Structures are given as structure tokens and as C-alpha cells.
Image: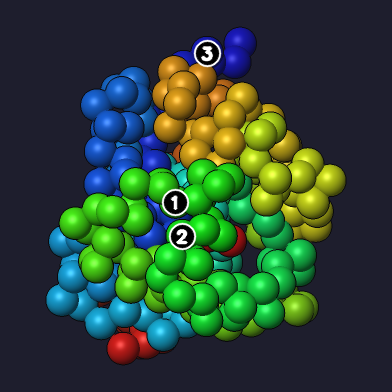
Amino acid sequence: MASTEAEPFDLACVPHAGGSARTFLRWQRSMPPSIRVVPLEMAGRGRRTRDPRPPTLTDAAVDLAARLDPRAPYAILGHSLGGLIAYEMARLLSDGAHIAPSFVVLAACRPPHLLSGSRYALLADLSDDDLIDELAPDGRIPESVRHSAMRQWFLPVIRGDIALAANYLPDPVAEPLPVNLLVWHGIADPATPPNALREWQRYTSRLFSVEAFPGGHFFIHDDLDHVADLLTAAALLVGPRPNSCQAHRTSRRTDPALVGRQGVEP
């Protein structure tokens, strides 16, 4: 008889453009004991303000993958720009030399072949107020940023993230991921129409699903009970990790295969 309880697992979370690890602090308090939330901090913000910002999105993925040190089976969740980074992390960690994630969740994130780098390049050239005018109406950044004391800190970070998206060059012949892929979107988010998100299916050779949530671009923070239920169901589909994997586990912090490749919302 199949188990109705998921094996405990780590959930590495990559935030949206302009976001930091603090975005997922409430998740740590709200998830069931079987899900250990591990917020990832990109270089150049939050606790890593003094670290050089990654020059490319792939460098950001390499940096975060090298910092993973899972003590249990793990999954990766990325939101918006973080979804692209999560995808590139999964590619790195599914190369046969590392333990691949059990599954990957991409929230509010269009697939690489449907991104428009030129559109993000235009955003990067806007003045601060025009950038807020462009991103605030559909909820991608809060309107309150316009008059916030944090404006001078926040806008350079989001400009840097927009540049990562604008200059992102996905591998046109990348192999599909050998892991289950879950794609989530808010039904009120005009940036992620369902027909576009179904295109993610070509990026996996395993199970694929698209889940619609009430809400807009930041829907994943609205109903954490539902998020926890879906994550638990995804873990049950994968099943327990074989014992043989334990012998091959390596620390991502010191793994030369990853560290050697480091560089200095969509």
C-alpha cells in the first residue's frame, strides 16, 4: 500500500526580481514539519549585500547551486525571475554528478523560449518613476516604493535583476530535465497566460503539471496551506529517495564541479 505521508524534504526557494530571502520567512513558520523551507539569498542583496552581483542569470544559478547543502531530499521553487534561476539550477544539478532535486516548482514564470530580452532591455532604460509606472499597475512591484525610504536601495536591485533577464541566453539545445516539473500561475496575472506556461512541458522528460491559483503575480504568498498541500502531493509522487543516493551526496558549498564555474521578473 502506498504511503500517504511524504518523506521530509528541503525546499530551496529563489525569490522574485528585487526580492530577497526574507520573502520566504513566513513560509518557514507556516509549512508543515515535513517541509523545511530554505530561503536562498542571491548575491548583492539582503544578507549578501557585500557579495558581488552575478553578471549573468546563469552565474546566479551556479552561485546558488553551489551554496546548497541538502540534509534530506530536496526540491527547488522559484518565483518569477527566480523561476528561471531555479530552472538553471536544476539543469546544473541534474548533470549526473550531483543529486538532482526531487522536483522543481516554477511560479509566475514564462519558459525561456518565450521571453523577450528586448522588452527587458527597454525596461532597464526607463527612469525610476517610469519603471515604477510600468511595473506597479499589475503588481510586479508595490506602488508604495515610489515614496518609500527603501526606494534608493530597492530600485538598483530590481534594475540589476531586469538586466539578468534582458541578457539571459538559454541553451537552445538543452536536454529536458529528468525531474518532475510543476508550473504555477495566478489567474489574474497577465504576464503568465496558461497557453504560454504549458510550453514548459518541453523542458522535462518526467511528470508535468500546470496549476492555476486565485490572485496575481504574487499569488504564492496568499494561501500557504494550499501551497503546502501541493508540495506534499508532489513529494508523494516522487516517493522516497533510494538509499544509494546517500553515498553520493556532496556538499554544494565545496563542490569544485560547481564552484569552478562561478562568476565573480520576468
Q: In which quarter of the image is residue 266?
A: bottom right
Residue tagged by mark 3?
Answer: 4
Question: Which numbered disc, 1 or 3, marks the residue closer to the eye?
Answer: 1
Distance from Cα at disc 1 to Cα at disc 3: 39 Å
Name which residue type carries label 1: Ile
The residue tagged with tag 3: helix, strand or loop? loop
Apparent side of residue 31 relative to residue 211 in the rendered image (left or right): left
Q: Residue 141 bears which disc, if any?
A: 1
Q: Earlier in the sequence, mark 2 or mark 3?
A: 3
Closer to the camera in the image, 79 or 244: 79
Q: What residue is at 77 percent from the left and 78 percent from the top?
A: 173
Residue 66 horizontal/vertical position (percent)? 34, 70
Q: Would you say the residues marked 2 and 1 are in contact, meaning their CB atoms lie under 8 Å apart?
A: yes
Residue tagged by mark 2?
Answer: 132
Distance from Cα at disc 2 to Cα at disc 3: 46 Å
Q: What residue is at 28 percent from the left and 32 percent from the top?
A: 26
Name which residue type carries label 3: Thr
Q: Quadrant of residue 217?
A: top right
Residue 231 horizontal/vertical position (percent)? 51, 30
Closer to the camera in the image, 239 or 44: 44
Please determine whether, in this image, residue 224 is positioned above or below residue 168.
Answer: above
Asked if residue 247 can be seen in this view, the reply is no
